[in-house]
Amino acid sequence: MTDPSFYYAIFKKLQASCGSDLASGYGHLNDDTSDDLAGGFSLRETQGIYGLYKSLQPGATGAAAYTADGVGHLNSTMQPLDPASTDPLQNPLYVMLKASLTPGGAPGNAAGYHFVTVGTQNWPVMPPPDLNGLPTNHPEWVEFNSGSHKLIDAFATWISNNKTDDSPKNPPLTYAALRATPPVKIPGTPDTGKGLFPILFVCSMPHDDGRRTGDGSLPDVGPNHVPANFWATSQIFLTDTMGNTVDPPTLDSQAEYYVAAMIGNNGNWDAGRVSSQPKIYVTCEAMAFNSHLSPGTLLPALSNLDTTLTSGTYEQYSLSRQSYEVAGFRFAVDTVFANIKTAMTNAGITPAQLGGLSIDAWVRASHACVKVLIMAGEDVILFPPAGNIPFTDKSDPQKDRHIAQHNLAPFNISAGAKKQLVWKNFIVDQAGAGLNGLLLQHALPADAFQLYLAIPTAIYERYIDAKGSKGGGAMRGFEVVRETASKPFPDAVILRQTARDAQLRVADHGREPFFGMSLGVSVDPAAIKGQRLGDIAMVHSAAEGGVVGGFTLRPKLGR
């Protein structure tokens, strides 16, 4: 069975158990240079200079600056974790924490001090117990150590397994990067004398401030504040289980990743349970690669101590005002793809709608999209989505700050190969009622690239072909071709792009809300040497012409 994540399930719970957040500081969350850094070690970041992996802070007035009742001086020779030992009982922090959970109260001496001895050093029991040696003043710590999945047990297992740090390792997800450029305060935000208002959002772009057109903030930021290709600019990343950001061209069987999503608070007060505000709940849905929406499955939250849960809600325990944080979800490829197949089956998708491929074959050959949604965390929704639309998993990221979507996949080109034709399958859904548009955008050199679309024959005839479609289907900038080097699925009408900004008008297909298509890219590697390659975007619009979604392929030249 997979172990809980250290960073998302253990470390963030240790932070929450301190009883404060990074904005106000308290105990182990004070600034690392503060004389009030409790115990001389910090829980602000996993690899901080006085963090769990390091030594205690020597203090402002020398190595003996910190003292603890019954322990005496704490000094820079002391380390919360023993780097040479995977025995929990030889790691002081585990022993200190475990002692706080002693039935009947932590051990104490005649003077009422509570401490433990590891090796030759005395350490204070943590969290600091009450006069009876009980951790009653730390409700989060008590809660996290209740039930069948206890934080202290997960901490012991993590130590035994070599104390691996799986926190995000690359900007913009690192501790330093998240705090380098905090969001700019929204004009018109009430001061704290008029109430405490967190303003939560999922980042749809770098340096997102949570503002959206039509949200009532003045002056209005306009319809272009969030980029039109928000699915490619969203700050949602795939990392490996060590926290390194990755961009795999294929999601291979048995592989496991984390989905790491930047979330923010641009309100006038800190958010989350630690700040006595509503709990912050975040979900992440993985879907078959698509141009807007497709059947999907909720991913397990990495905040879970119980890793047997197949889906779940991520809790962010604290989110300081004007700050960013990272929410994490587990992406086990085999499990996710199996659940997507079930969702596609339950949605009534048939092989005929996938050009003759089975759902199993379609999913095994596909990539995935993810969608992250803040479900709760604000008592009052300041600057609500345009039209006061309740935020749901179908909300528009350009209008609703609570949701972001990532539909971006690498497109690998083999530099040494001859001319090649590669297909990327995707799902098209009916967005709203009426005609939908699919607009193909790119600026690739015509002498090196040729783009194609493949559509199941019956779908093409019913919803796109102007001769057969009764609902206004049409195409511009494409021509039907009879032969190509390959097909993505057996039953396919192949269209070749003949003009920039080629577009399909897809008739209302509400009775078949999902069907498959494929984007083909023919490339001559010899013709692109030294050239800078741009993205390929498929933009999906609704009947009124507004962009509702899309996906982006990012060509990469490899060997």
Image (spheres, rainbow, N blue to C red):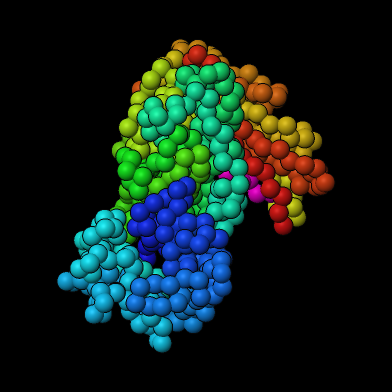
Q: Which quadrant does the C terminus fall into?
A: bottom right
- Looking at the rendering, the stretch of residues picked out in magenta corresponds to 408-413
In terms of depth relative to the viewer, which is nearer, 410 or 166? Answer: 166
In terms of depth relative to the viewer, which is nearer, 448 or 54? Answer: 54
Q: Residue at x 23, y 80 (%)?
A: 110
Q: Position of residue 420 (x, y in %)?
A: 69, 46
Q: Residue at x 17, y 71 (%)?
A: 104
Going by the image, does 370 lie left or right of 134?
right
Q: Residue at x 55, y 54 (%)?
A: 175
**Depicted 440 relative to depicted 25: above or below:** above
In terms of depth relative to the viewer, which is nearer, 441 or 285? Answer: 285
**Depicted 75 relative to depicted 353: above or below:** below
- Whether residue 157 is visible here, answered yes or no, is no
Q: Position of residue 14 (x, y in %)?
A: 38, 60
In terms of depth relative to the viewer, which is nearer, 415 or 431? Answer: 431
Q: Residue furthest right?
A: 530
